[in-house]
Amino acid sequence: MAEACATYIDEDVAAAGLFSVDGVADRLVAVSTSRFVIFDGYDDTPEGYGPTSILAEFDRDTTSLQFEDEGHLHHVTLQHGDSTATLSGDVTAFGHGSQGRRHVLEAMGSPSV
């Protein structure tokens, strides 16, 4: 996933994972060296697809992050000016895609992953 994101945005990507974003499932979220990027999605099956468009971007230096967790379900609200996005994802040990979500949360600086 990170490789697909890096190719698309032409920047190093520290982590990428699938989250629900503002209630819409399977949005690909990437943490790059300078920004947080929300893509339309990613499917890693053999007939799958990579990201095809950027839905939102947030500058790492000027975006505030608010972390909240409810057991294995983690939420992150990104806010920059009038733009906000809330990411939600389960990080259980065996959940589909949880490893990617864990990496994204760690790269964002989540205190409780």
Image: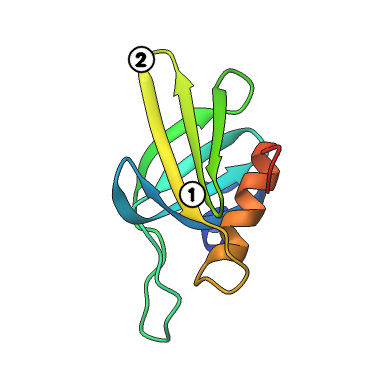
Q: Are marks 2 and 1 in contact (CB under 8 Å)?
A: no
- Tell me: 30 left or right of 103: left
At horizontal 61% and vertical 49% (from top left) the residue drawn is 104
Task: Say few, some or many: other residues with alpha carbon within 10 Å of mark 1 (under 14 / 14 to 19 / 20 or more).
Answer: many
Q: Position of residue 93 (x, y in %)?
A: 63, 69
Q: Residue furthest bottom?
A: 46
Q: Which mark is residue 60?
A: none
Whether residue 81 is visible: yes
Q: Residue 6 is drawn in which quadrant?
A: bottom right
Which three-letter amino acid code belongs to the residue tagged 1? Val
Estimate how packed mark 2 is, as few (under 14), some (14 to 19) or many (20 or more) residues with alpha carbons within 10 Å: few
In the visual, does 63 lie left or right of 53?
right
At a point 57% along the width and 48% down the height, the residue shown is: 10
Residue 5 position, x and y percent, is 52, 55
Q: Which residue is at 49% across, 49% downward?
A: 29
Q: In what element is the residue under mark 1?
A: strand
Task: Give the alpha-carbon distance from disc 2 to disc 1, as whole Å.
Answer: 20 Å
Judged left or right of residue 24, residue 4 is right
* Residue 55 percent across, percent down from the top left: 34, 41
Q: Is residue 102 above or below residue 49?
A: above
Q: Is residue 7 above or below residue 80?
A: below
Foreground of the two, 79 or 9:
79
Q: Residue beneath label 2, please?
A: 82
Task: Tell me what residue is drawn at x 62 percent, y 43 percent.
Answer: 32
Please state, as top left, top right, bottom left or bottom right, where the N terminus lies in the image.
bottom right
Report whether 7 appears left or right of 39: right
Front in this rendered view, residue 63 or 34: 63
Q: Which residue position is annotated with label 1?
A: 29
